[in-house]
C-alpha cells in the first residue's frame, strides 16, 4: 500500500512540474505572432535559454516591466523591415509633408535627450540648449537654432544631404547655428567598447569647408533606441527625419524624406525667422 501511494505521489509531482514548465514557456510565447504553441519547433535551445533568463529576471514580479516588454515586442514585430519597405515603396520616404510654418513654442515638443559620439570618440548630449547641463563641451556655445538630421538606416543618407547641404550653403557664415547629422547604430555587437572604437575609426568624417563657420557635425548614437523612437513617433526606419530646434531644444519645424525645392525654401525661411525671433 505504501509503495503504491509513493508511486502515485511521484507521478503527480512529475505532472505538476511538467505543467508548470509548459505554462511558463507558453506565457512568454504569447508575446509573439504564434497562436498555436504546439506548432513551434521542439528543439530551440537558444530560445529556451532566453526564455529561462527572462523568467528568472522577472520571477519576483515586476508587472509593469513585463507589460512594457510585451508591448515592445508586439510593436517591434508589427513594425518590421518588410512593413517599412512596403511603405517606402508607396511614398519614397515622404511619410508626411514638411512644416510650412514654424511650430508655435507653446505647442512644440522638446527634443528627447540623446547621447551621440563623434568619430574621435568624444561624447555629447543633444539637444544643446540654454537649459542643458552640458553646454560648454569643447567651447560649444548654445546655438540659437540647430538643424538635427536623423538617419536610422544607410538608405536615408542621400535624403539627409538634400536638406543639410542647402542649409550649410545658406548659413555657412553664421556662428549661432549648429548642424548635426545623427546616424543610429542599434546592433548591440557594434556597441561593445573594442568594436565600437574600431568602428569609429572607419566611419564617415565630416568634409567641412575651411571657409565655412558653420560646421557639419557627423555623430553616431549607439544602442537601443526604441524609447527614443517612440517619443519621436518615428514611423519608418528607412526614411530621414529633419528637425529644426530652437535654443531651448524645442522642435519648431520638421521635414521627412528627400527635400523638394519648395521644402528647402520653407526650411531656410523658418530658420531665418527663428534667428530673428531669438
Image: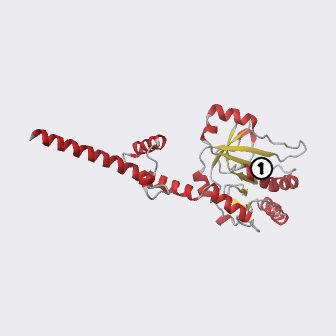
Is 262 in front, or is 82?
A: 82
Q: Is residue 217 left or right of residue 186?
A: right
Q: Determine which residue is flagged by label 1.
A: 178
Q: Is residue 135 left or right of residue 59?
A: right
Measured as percent of width and height from the top left, residue 245 is found at 72, 56
Tell me what residue is drawn at x 45 percent, y 59 percent. Answer: 35
In the current view of this chain or complex, which residue is farthest to the bottom? 100
How many numbered marks appear?
1
Residue at image x 91%, y 44%? 211
Residue furthest to the top in view is 194
Q: Quadrant of the C terminus?
A: bottom right
Whether residue 169 is visible to the viewer of this picture, yes or no, is: yes
Q: Quadrant of residue 94?
A: bottom right
Is 98 left or right of 212, judged from the image as shown?
left
Whether residue 235 is visible: no
| Front-most of residues 139 and 199 | 199
Q: Quadrant of residue 268?
A: bottom right
Q: Residue at x 69, y 67 (%)?
A: 104
Amino acid at each position: 500500500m505504501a509503495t503504491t501511494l509513493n508511486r502515485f505521489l511521484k507521478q503527480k509531482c512529475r505532472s505538476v512540474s511538467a505543467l508548470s514548465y509548459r505554462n511558463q514557456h507558453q506565457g512568454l510565447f504569447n508575446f509573439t505572432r504564434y497562436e498555436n504553441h504546439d506548432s513551434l519547433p521542439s528543439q530551440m535551445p537558444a530560445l529556451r535559454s532566453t526564455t529561462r533568463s527572462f523568467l528568472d529576471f522577472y520571477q519576483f514580479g515586476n508587472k509593469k516591466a513585463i507589460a512594457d516588454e510585451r508591448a515592445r515586442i508586439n510593436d517591434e514585430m508589427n513594425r518590421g523591415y518588410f512593413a517599412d519597405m512596403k511603405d517606402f515603396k508607396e511614398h519614397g520616404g515622404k511619410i508626411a509633408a514638411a512644416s510650412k510654418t514654424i511650430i508655435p513654442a507653446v505647442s512644440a515638443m522638446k527634443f528627447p535627450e540623446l547621447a551621440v559620439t563623434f568619430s574621435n570618440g568624444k561624447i555629447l548630449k543633444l539637444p544643446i540648449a540654454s537649459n542643458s547641463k552640458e553646454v560648454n563641451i569643447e567651447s560649444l556655445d548654445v546655438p540659437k537654432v540647430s538643424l538635427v538630421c536623423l538617419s536610422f538606416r544607410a538608405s536615408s543618407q542621400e535624403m539627409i544631404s538634400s536638406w543639410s547641404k542647402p542649409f550649410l550653403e545658406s548659413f555657412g557664415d553664421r556662428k549661432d547655428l549648429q548642424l548635426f547629422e545623427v546616424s543610429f547604430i542599434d546592433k548591440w555587437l557594434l556597441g561593445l567598447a573594442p568594436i565600437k572604437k574600431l568602428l569609429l575609426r572607419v566611419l564617415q568624417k565630416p568634409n567641412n569647408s575651411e571657409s565655412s563657420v558653420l560646421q557639419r557635425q557627423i555623430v553616431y548614437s549607439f544602442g537601443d533606441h526604441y524609447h527614443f523612437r517612440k517619443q519621436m513617433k518615428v514611423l519608418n526606419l528607412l526614411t530621414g527625419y529633419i528637425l529644426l530646434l530652437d535654443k531651448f531644444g524645442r522642435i519648431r519645424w520638421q521635414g521627412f524624406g528627400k527635400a523638394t525645392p519648395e521644402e528647402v525654401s520653407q526650411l531656410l525661411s523658418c530658420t531665418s525667422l527663428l534667428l530673428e525671433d531669438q
